Image: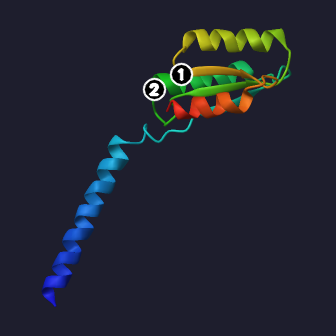
Amino acid sequence: MDIPVLIAAVILTVIAVVEVICLLCCPKVKAVPLTVIVRGDDPRLEEKLRYTAYLFATEECCVTKIMIIECGEDYHAKAVCARFCAEFPERANIVNEKNENFVQKIIDFTAEI
């Protein structure tokens, strides 16, 4: 009876070690892009993008990419988003809601991760 218990304990220990290694080493591999819907009348847009830039800089969480979906025609919102994308060209992507390939861009952007 001791041998099956010993084998089970060894197997559970190996599984626990693999889980800890994956938890510490692989969280960025499974990161999902943060999606931000931009509306021209959003008064907190700059604050949201500043917080996202803070997350990029500190790498505290799994946010590695951001997809900005423009839903309005506001010039100020577009300028703010363009500045943000210029600051983080590898991590940010702007998608216009009226774009014909809207769904395809979302799929391609997610596949990059």
Percent across and percent down for residue 40 are: 84, 19
Q: Is residue 5 above or below residue 101?
A: below
What secondary structure is found at the residue carrying circle 2?
Answer: helix
Nearer to us: label 2 or label 1: 1
Distance, label 2 to label 1, CA atoms, is 14 Å
Disc 2 residue type (three-letter): Thr
Percent across and percent down for residue 13 are: 23, 65
* Label 2 sits on residue: 58
What secondary structure is found at the residue carrying circle 1?
Answer: loop
* Label 1 sits on residue: 91
Disc 1 residue type (three-letter): Arg
Q: Residues within 10 Å of mark 2 (few under 14, many from 20)?
A: few
Percent across and percent down for residue 58 are: 45, 26
- Residue located at (23% from left, 69% from top): 11
- Left or right of 111? Residue 40 is right
Q: Are marks 2 and 1 in contact (CB under 8 Å)?
A: no
- Residue located at (16% from left, 78% from top): 6
Count of all numbered marks drawn on residues in the image: 2
